[in-house]
Image (cartoon, helix red, strand yellow):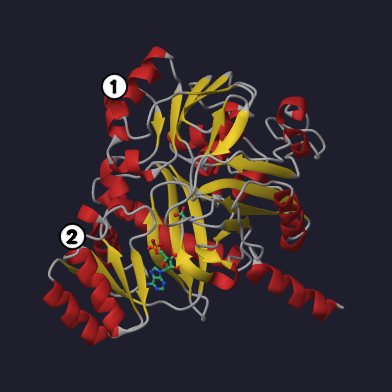
Amino acid sequence: MSNTPHRARTLLVIGGGGREHALVWSLARSPEVSRVLVAPGNAGTSNEPKVENLPIADHDIEALALIAKERKVDLTVVGPETPLVAGIVDHFSAQGLRIFGPSAAAARLEGSKSFAKDFLARHRIPTAAHGVFTRIEDAKAYIEKRRAPIVIKADGLAAGKGVIVARSNNQAIEAAREMLEGGAFGGAGRTIVIEDFLAGEEASFICVAGSQGVVPLASAQDHKTLLDGDEGPNTGGMGAYSPAPVVDARLSDRIMREIIHPTLQGLAAEGMPYTGFLYAGLMIDPDGAPHVIEFNCRLGDPETQPILLRLRSSLLDLIEAALAGDPAKNPPEWDERASLGVVMASEGYPEKPRKGDVIHGLDESQERTGEGIGEESGGSGKSGEVDNPVTKVFHAGTALQGDRVVTSGGRVLCICALGKDVSEARRIALDRADGIQWPGAFFRRDIGHRAIAREEARAKKIG
Ligand code: AMP
Ligand code: GLY
């Protein structure tokens, strides 16, 4: 971008999950980037060209600022919500360090569900009716008035686990009691939000926001439950794909008009302008109207992995345009193909994942099945535009033990693939996943089922 005053050369990415591997991989593909530091990263990031892992926790803001100064980092990109909610952007900015993400005040959109819900109500942005409670008697009375199905949410950050969709009044009251009095989710559950159940289809709508403008990324859909058929407990996400056919161009415009613009304008009007990735978790009701389920102040995990596999333009240029004010001046360009990611998890996830197993079948050379990637073909075609590999394994809970890659968390890998449609992308991703093993590894085989059902219905109509 010619209007960017400052070309970043050494970057720092904060976080160590699958989303951060995808961020690091995408950022490192810009020819002007000479080094990407990642704190703490994982085995996957440490194997990427130009990338260096740093043994610093993602919430150690002081140590991160020190290393950013010491290593002359030009720009820091934050992956997870914890450091954002804790104020890393304010801290870095106060020291003159360039960083991309929202301030602590704006990150409350994710950090406090009661703040987000009250904000949405204040600005008449569509969302489920809600109440905020700290006393069980009041919560119980509200549940009995609104009646199940009803949704109980811990107010604070609970790593995606503080939400109970209750099918009966009793289950709702029990969930509220456990959060308010039983210490479930600790401090995060001392205040709860109770909201009406929304029926429909979920979609992840992620934008890049600057002080003067905003641009959506490609749409995506995530699968939050553990098991095939959308059964089992909620997890951080077991797979995702992009684009999400439920979000067509018309609906995307409507979401921008009814949800994203009013949110950003409302935040600015209240003195907390938002810069960074903004993730709206939406429920599209049976009439096609979008409602906010939640906001996240960051990219989604695993949505980021299939989304960035489709990005053909430079992620760094997009972020720089947002920092300069308006990312819409440099809108992202997407691979026409569908992208799909399957999360491979460890036995025991999400409760108590087993760790320390050696992973077999991670053959990096299999990723280079495209027409040549980043480093080789970065100069061809439009400036900065690259051909993406057909498959890519993004790491999450992995660590290096000598030269062996071992499991170190619940969600271990996200196997991503591009295909002419979601169905083909899934076939390629599953094929690749079937070639990777460790004891107790498991994954869903039905990621993308809604999109694939649509594709099959369309094919039947035509055929
Ligand atoms: P959240 O952490 O707020 O995104 O909630 C986790 C999951 O719970 C969402 O992805 C939905 O599947 C479900 N959920 C949350 N709120 C509602 C709601 N009001 N109605 C229906 N499902 C919900
Ligand atoms: N995949 C859901 C999230 O990142 O919150």
Which quadrant does the C terminus fall into?
A: bottom right
Compare residues 323 and 309 and report the one nearer the observer: 309
Residue at position x 59%, y 57% from top?
240
Q: Is residue 244 above or below residue 111?
A: below
**Label 1 Cα crowd, 10 Å radius (few <14 / some 14-19 / many 20+):** few
Q: Is residue 274 left or right of residue 387?
A: left
Percent from the top left, x then y, of residue 133? 17, 68
Q: Residue furthest right?
A: 463
Percent from the top left, x then y, of residue 117? 28, 64
**Label 2 Cα crowd, 10 Å radius (few <14 / some 14-19 / many 20+):** many
Percent from the top left, x then y, of residue 353? 47, 51
Compare residues 44 and 440 and report the one nearer the observer: 440
Q: Is residue 242 left or right of residue 367?
A: left
Q: Which mark is residue 95?
A: 1
Q: Amino acid at mark 2?
A: Arg
Residue on which disc 2 sits:
190
SS at mark 2 in the image = loop
